[in-house]
Image (cartoon, rainbow, N blue to C red):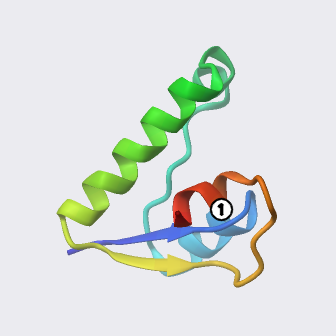
Amino acid sequence: MGKIVLGHFPEYIALATEIGAEVFNLPKQQWNHLDDEGRWKANQRFLDDAIERDDEIVLSTTGVKRGSWFERELR
């Protein structure tokens, strides 16, 4: 069992670094190469894998911005 952090960029990355958790963070070149559907598929696979492993999911914030990737991840 591992640990992942979800939240808004870049805060979730800072928290994950602090607590030694994993995050979904594609290299900028790869992220820019994908369209929104491709980005979401990669993100969803990361989430599905974490759930399958029964990882602990830590939220870096309780405030959710409408229309954000974080909102989509929570749904």
Residue depicted at x 53% and y 37%: 40
Label tally: 1
Residue 41 in percent (x, y) is at: 44, 34
Residue 6's spot in the image, x, y percent?
56, 67
**Left or right relative to 16: residue 35:** right
Q: Quadrant of the N terminus?
A: bottom left
**Horizontal side, residue 71 vs residue 73: left or right:** right
Q: Secondary structure at mark 1?
A: helix
- The residue positioned 55% from the left and 26% from the top of the image is 37
Q: Residue furthest right?
A: 65
Q: Quadrant of residue 17?
A: bottom right
Seen from the viewer's position, the closer of residues 27 and 52 is: 52
Which residue is located at x 56 percent, y 45 percent?
25
Locate residue 12, reporting x and y percent. 65, 67
* Residue drawn at 74 percent across, 57 percent down: 9
Query: What's the residue type where badge 1 is placed?
Result: Glu
The answer to whether 8 is drawn above or below residue 24 in the figure is below
Please tell me in which quadrant of the rendered image residue 14 appears: bottom right
Label 1: how many Cα within 10 Å (few below 14, some 14–19, many 20+): some
Q: Is residue 2 above or below residue 29?
A: below
Front position in the image: 39 or 25: 39
Depth check: give the residue in front, 27 or 53: 53
Q: Most extreme residue toward the top, as rendered?
A: 33
Q: Position of residue 51 (x, y in %)?
A: 27, 65
Q: Which residue corresponds to mark 1?
A: 71
Q: Is residue 37 left or right of residue 43?
A: right
Q: Is residue 70 above or below residue 31?
A: below
